[in-house]
Image (spheres, helix red, strand yellow):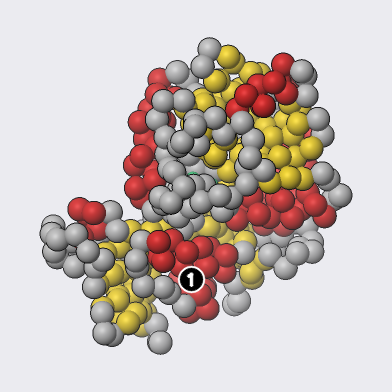
């Protein structure tokens, strides 16, 4: 499929202060769109000026939340070139989400081609400042104007780009996390393993409570027994207990994070003891009381590696590693960002360079 290009006649001014971008506020000049119609497949691929969408008020995504999304980044290297981190993993995961939400799958190679073309056109928007990057948001929405409940016949696949800084205003400083014991985010058999808006809608009430108590995000427990650790609002979670790196196993209710997967591979390559297993919040609290909870950190595209300095579970407040970034978290952060920004050699084949 060819990609038609219509360039903007009114380019916007780019942010002048890249150290103050925040996350997800600014959008570039162009976006990628393609449509799907039953019987026709994906068609009409185009890059057009960034603008509001025209959508029927009856569009199905607005009523029954048939939508999926992804999140990845483009990074500027010291020599001025642009590169991405494992983009094919994002489009493969998009198809996993698509399957669960009965949305037609996309061609991974074509999506990468479309993304390369879009980022090349808006290349000057990729920030030059360390720590900032171009956040990429591909998403699919069901657009049939229809109020019955069924999988839609028409969809739009869109990619928008947002020059962004740190997801948390604290940057690499440790975040405080609140363990949610009342509400649950997802259960096995549900949609927890997908990236769909509904999961995030379900998480808002917990996040609100966390913010009221001055914590940045929520750590979710399993939806059945409310004992076992799942993940944080926008990242997977890792614990270092007595020198062993532990993260919850993938069992259907948490997202299979690409950063999570990469950190596991990286730590294994360093010869560290790493395990993916079911772990309860009680085990974490016991390790803390025994002085064996060495470090806690979250992983995610937006959050990168985010040290956790404080964990609140009921009345118990655990201060981890003196509320400072731990040695291992720092090493993982330096290595991951080193590869992403092209300062370190990519021994794993994770970097996708933008041509031209
Ligand atoms: N868990 C949730 C709920 C997320 O939204 C994210 C962010 O994408 C992650 C985990 C981390 O996934 P990834 O490392 O692929 O960005
Ligand atoms: C990401 O890390 O890409 C995410 O999707 C987090 C997000 C919900 C802001």
Does any atom of ligand 2 lie closer than 8 Å to the CB of label 1? no
* Residue 89 appears in view: yes
The furthest residue to the front: 225
The furthest residue to the top: 315
As rendered, which of 166 and 245 lies closer to the eye?
245
Mark 1: which secondary structure?
A: helix
Q: Position of residue 224 (x, y in %)?
A: 46, 36
Say whether residue 210 is left or right of residue 155.
right
As rendered, which of 102 and 278 lies closer to the eye?
278
Q: Quadrant of the N terminus?
A: bottom left
Relative vertical location of residue 220 with respect to residue 317 in this rendering, above or below:
below
Q: Residue at x 75, y 40 (%)?
A: 245
Relative vertical location of residue 205 with respect to residue 77 in this rendering, above or below:
above
Say whether residue 5 is left or right of residue 72.
left
Q: Position of residue 129 (x, y in %)?
A: 60, 49
Q: Residue at x 39, y 37 (%)?
A: 203
Label 1: how many Cα within 10 Å (few below 14, some 14–19, many 20+)? many
Q: Residue at x 73, y 23 (%)?
A: 287
Look at mark 1 in the image and give the residue it sits on: 115
Say whether residue 350 is left or right of residue 91.
right
Q: Quadrant of the C terminus?
A: bottom right
As rendered, which of 96 and 82 lies closer to the eye?
96
Where residue 195 sits, quadrant-wise, is bottom left
Q: Residue at x 42, y 35 (%)?
A: 184
Query: How many discs mark residues in the rendered view?
Result: 1
């Amino acid at each position: 499929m060819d990609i038609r290009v219509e360039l903007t006649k009114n380019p916007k001014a780019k942010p002048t202060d890249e150290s103050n971008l925040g996350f997800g506020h600014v959008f570039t000049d162009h976006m990628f769109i393609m449509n799907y119609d039953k019987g026709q497949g994906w068609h009409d691929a185009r890059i057009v000026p960034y603008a509001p969408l025209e959508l029927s008020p009856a569009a199905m995504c607005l009523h029954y939340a048939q939508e999926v999304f992804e999140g990845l980044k483009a990074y500027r290297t010291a020599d001025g070139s642009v590169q991405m981190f494992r983009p094919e993993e994002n489009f493969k995961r998009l198809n996993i989400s698509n399957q669960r939400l009965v949305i037609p799958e996309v061609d991974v190679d074509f999506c990468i081609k479309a993304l390369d073309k879009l980022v090349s056109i808006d290349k000057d928007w990729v920030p030059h400042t360390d720590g900032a990057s171009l956040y990429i948001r591909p998403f699919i929405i069901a657009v049939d104007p229809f109020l019955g409940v069924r999988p839609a016949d028409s969809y739009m696949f869109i990619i928008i780009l947002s020059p962004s800084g740190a997801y948390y205003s604290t940057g690499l400083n440790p975040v405080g996390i609140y363990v949610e014991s009342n509400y649950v985010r997802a259960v096995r058999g549900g949609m927890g393993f997908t990236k769909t808006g509904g999961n995030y809608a379900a998480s808002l009430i917990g996040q609100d409570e966390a913010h009221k108590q001055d914590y940045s995000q929520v750590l979710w427990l399993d939806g059945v027994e409310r004992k076992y650790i799942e993940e944080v609002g926008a990242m997977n979670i890792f614990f270092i207990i007595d020198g062993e790196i532990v993260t919850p196993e993938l069992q259907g209710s948490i997202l299979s994070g690409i950063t999570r997967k990469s950190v596991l591979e990286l730590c294994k390559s360093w010869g560290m003891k790493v395990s993916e297993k079911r772990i309860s919040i009680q085990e974490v609290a016991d390790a803390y009381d025994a002085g064996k909870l060495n470090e806690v950190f979250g992983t995610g595209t937006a959050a990168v590696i985010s040290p956790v300095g404080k964990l609140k579970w009921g009345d118990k407040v655990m201060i981890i590693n003196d509320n400072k970034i731990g040695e291992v978290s720092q090493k993982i952060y330096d290595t991951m960002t080193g590869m992403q920004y092209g300062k370190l050699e990519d021994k794993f084949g994770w970097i996708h360079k933008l041509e031209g």
